[in-house]
Amino acid sequence: MLRLIKNISLMVIYSIAYYAKKGKLHYFLIPLLLVLCFTGGILTGRNSSHKENDLSSLYPLDRNTLEKIEPSFIGLNVNYQPSLSKDGRYVAFASINIEVNKIKDIEVKLYDTKTRKYVVLPGINSRGWDLAPSITADGRYIAFQSNRDGVTQWNIYLYDVEGKKFVEVPNLNSPFPDFNPSISPEGNFITFNSLRSLVPKVYLYSMEEKKIKPLMEDNME
């Protein structure tokens, strides 16, 4: 057993060193985190001391119900990327629905801590992956990224929580991936990453001017 643990440890160390050298460490860490998620429950806050094959501690179902469920339908939800309104009432986050060994869907959700209920956001989520929400100080607007127009076509979207509709953001998105948005507290600006220059850079979008404003580094040549 000790030899097995030693060999596995060496494999992990060699893998980390290899991917770090190639600059692709995330290719190793993301699958590792998902494995730990299933085995130890580190992303769900669950206690990993439950007995092997005893799913009753992981899912709020009785044993008779669990025995009727096929393993391929058993998964879990991982919530991450939270964004909080100024008064702490609204929490926006991405909810990942994982089924066995694959991500089934990623959705943007908004929770009202006052009513202790989720806010209905008609149309905000799609068949693609909707994630990285950023909420304004008053909780009215949510900026997020989505690939609803294509698996590799990431765009930035702005949603009006009060009006239950999308807000136009002309001249923001490009033919290249635009992602990781962050909206200012008043909703006047959206900063985000983009590959429009073929390398990841930070860009600033003005809601008032409806255009990209140059950053300091863009003027330093």
Image (tube, rainbow, N blue to C red):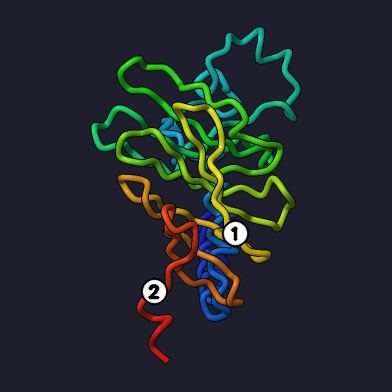
Residue that sits furthest to the front in the current view: 209
Residue in the picture at 57% in, 60% down: 171
**Mark 2 belongs to which amino acid?**
Leu
Alpha carbon separation for disc pair 1 and 2 = 17 Å
Q: Is residue 103 left or right of residue 25?
A: right
Nearest the eye: 168 or 37 = 168
Asked if residue 37 lies left or right of residue 216, the reply is: right
Name the residue type under label 1. Answer: Asn
Name the quarter where the C terminus is drawn: bottom left
Q: Are marks 1 and 2 in contact (CB under 8 Å)?
A: no
Q: Nearer the viewer, residue 121 or 170?
A: 170
Q: Is residue 42 above or below residue 6?
A: above
Q: Nearer the viewer, residue 20 or 117?
A: 117
Q: Element at badge 1?
A: loop
**Residue shown at 35% from the left, 30% from the top:** 90
Task: Tell me where residue 31 appears, x and y as whole percent.
Answer: 59, 54
Dot 1 alpha-carbon crowd within 10 angstroms: few under 14, some 14 to 19, many 20 or more: some
Image location of residue 92, percent across then percent down: 42, 35
Q: Earlier in the sequence, mark 1 or mark 2?
A: 1
Q: Residues within 10 Å of mark 2 (few under 14, many from 20)?
A: few
Return the residue found at the far left: 87
At horizontal 46% and vertical 21% (from top left) the residue drawn is 118
**Residue 52 coordinates in the image, percent (x, y):** 57, 29
In the depicted view, which residue is nearer to us: 176 or 103? Answer: 176
Left or right: 118, with 34 as reference point:
left
Dividing the picture into quarters, in which one does residue 189 lie? bottom left
Which residue is outermost to the bottom?
221
Please tell me which residue is depicted at 50% across the width and 31% down the height of the picture: 109
Q: Which residue is mark 2?
A: 215
In the picture of the structure, the residue carrying the numbered disc 1 is: 173
Q: Tag 2's secondary structure? A: loop
